[in-house]
Amino acid sequence: NSHGWIPMQSQSSSSSVDFDPSMLPRYGGTGGRYRYKAYVIVDSSASPTIKSEEGDCARFMQSIGWTVLHRPPLVPLFPVPSDVSSTADSSATFDELVKAGYVGVQRPKTGDTARQPGEHLNKLPMFLYDEGCCGDTELLKLHIYGIVGHELAVHLDFDSLILRPMDDLFDVMLGKQNDDKVASSLAIAKLPHSKPVDFSRPIDAAFTRDYNSVKHPEANSPVGYQGGFLIVRPSLAVLERYRKILQRGEFTLNPRKGWGNKHGNFYGDATFQGILPYYYEDIAPPGEHNELELDRCIYNQMADNPRKSTHRFPRATPLNPNIMGYEDTNICRDGRKDCSDTDCQRMHPKDSITAHFTFCGKPWHCSPGLPGTVALETCIGLLSEWYGVRRELEDWWLLPRKETIDESIDVSFSQRSFYRDEQTISRVHIKRQGPLQPDVYKGYCDAKGNSGYLNMMGPDGLKK
């Protein structure tokens, strides 16, 4: 989906490529107008310089051309002992952690967000440790604001897939749209928390909200931003404001009302999903930012059910409630009476721009989708597209260098990865022979479940 990309269907066949158009993506783009550079942000515990398995992920991303950014963890810590007035008097361990990038907390001594009597000094950071999906490591995502070498920065969780170019959204965010029709055609959310957008100004942030995390759906219930998707105009000033938020540590736990005593009581509220709305809605100077809530069925599509069910957790609409053991209620998760316009579980993959594999399951777990529900068709379509993208990437790496895209177009050609070794090429083809529903899993699964996935072969190295 980047500028200069030519889909494999348009490239010549090769003896090294088992070319089969039916195995390639069905809904992908044909090359956008924007160039991309890929980054992975890690703290010291996941650095590629670590020889153990903790460094494996970043090492692999580095090997296929991603740039690894080492960034401090931004985890808030309170000074010890509790009666110190400055970090100069605090413990040596605390000072060392602050120097390493942790945030020394200076929580207000009075007011609604002050530490309550008997509350452990470090309760918030201890609480953050296993909060949400990933604990305090989610705060690393805030470093997207520090990538100031680019006009826009896009954060995606690793279980995401870009289906089509986001050119129109980028144009609008940068104020480069040719006419008002581009802005009016964007898939914008029109929900109780959605704010009006001034399209005459550049847009500083684009996001989706996670209505599935709302515990008590009402029109005024606090709703977090979905943590797997965020597009921003980078700013070191904004990053510093987040650091100040963490330094003050004003997250109310007893009762759990969250950041600023109002952004909480939903999944991930203490980390990324809660701190984002707290910043944009309460901390940022009024009128400074122009943010945009996107339609979550089009961007960051998770195939979610807009209604609550009788199950204790969010679930897709069952085809047979008696068999599944639960059924939909009439309660919309966004607090409206009618939420049929956000029924993402029925959205066809061709209509979405990015996908996020949460409810549908992970492709590398050979997920069955959501059988027995109306979301099955959508999930299978998205999963199949992911396997198609893997196939296309492997085919691209299999091409002899003279058959790859034009070097004059691809400015990153010097960092291209390839399958060169005959043994590697043989293994790539072997790992395409999984018998599980080849029309869906494209030969990459022996069986459903984690153990059924045929792992992808890494490239033989970068072109030198």
Image: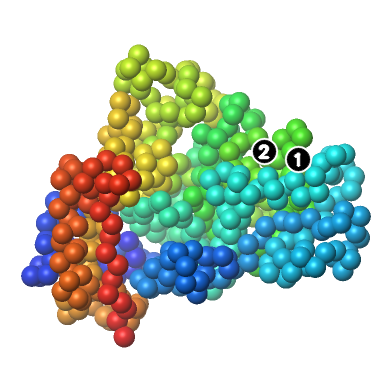
| Residue located at (86% from left, 50% from top) | 108
| Residue located at (42% from left, 70% from top) | 59
Quadrant where the C terminus lies? bottom left
The percent coordinates of residue 87 (x first, y second) are: 85, 65
Q: Is residue 201 visible?
A: no
Task: Describe the element under mark 1 as helix, strand or loop.
Answer: strand
Q: Which residue is mark 1?
A: 252
- In this view, the residue farthest toward the top is 322
The percent coordinates of residue 282 (x first, y second) are: 72, 47
* Front-most of residues 462 and 241: 462
Q: Amino acid at mark 2?
A: Gly
The percent coordinates of residue 16 (x first, y second) are: 12, 70
- Quadrant of residue 428 in the image? bottom left
* Front-most of residues 386 and 163: 386
Circle number at residue 49: none
Q: Amino acid at mark 1?
A: Thr
Q: Are marks 1 and 2 in contact (CB under 8 Å)?
A: yes
Give the Cα separation between the discs numbered 1 and 2: 8 Å
Q: Which residue is mark 2?
A: 264
* Front-most of residues 367 and 167: 367
- In this view, the residue farthest toward the front is 52
Q: In the displayed structure, would residue 140 be above or below residue 441?
A: below
Quadrant where the N terminus lies? bottom left
Q: Is residue 71 left or right of residue 258?
A: left
| Residue located at (80% from left, 68% from top) | 92
Q: Is residue 225 left or right of residue 184?
A: right
Q: Is residue 428 left or right of residue 180?
A: left
| Residue located at (31% from left, 42% from top) | 449
Q: Is residue 75 visible?
A: yes
Q: How are the residues colored?
A: rainbow
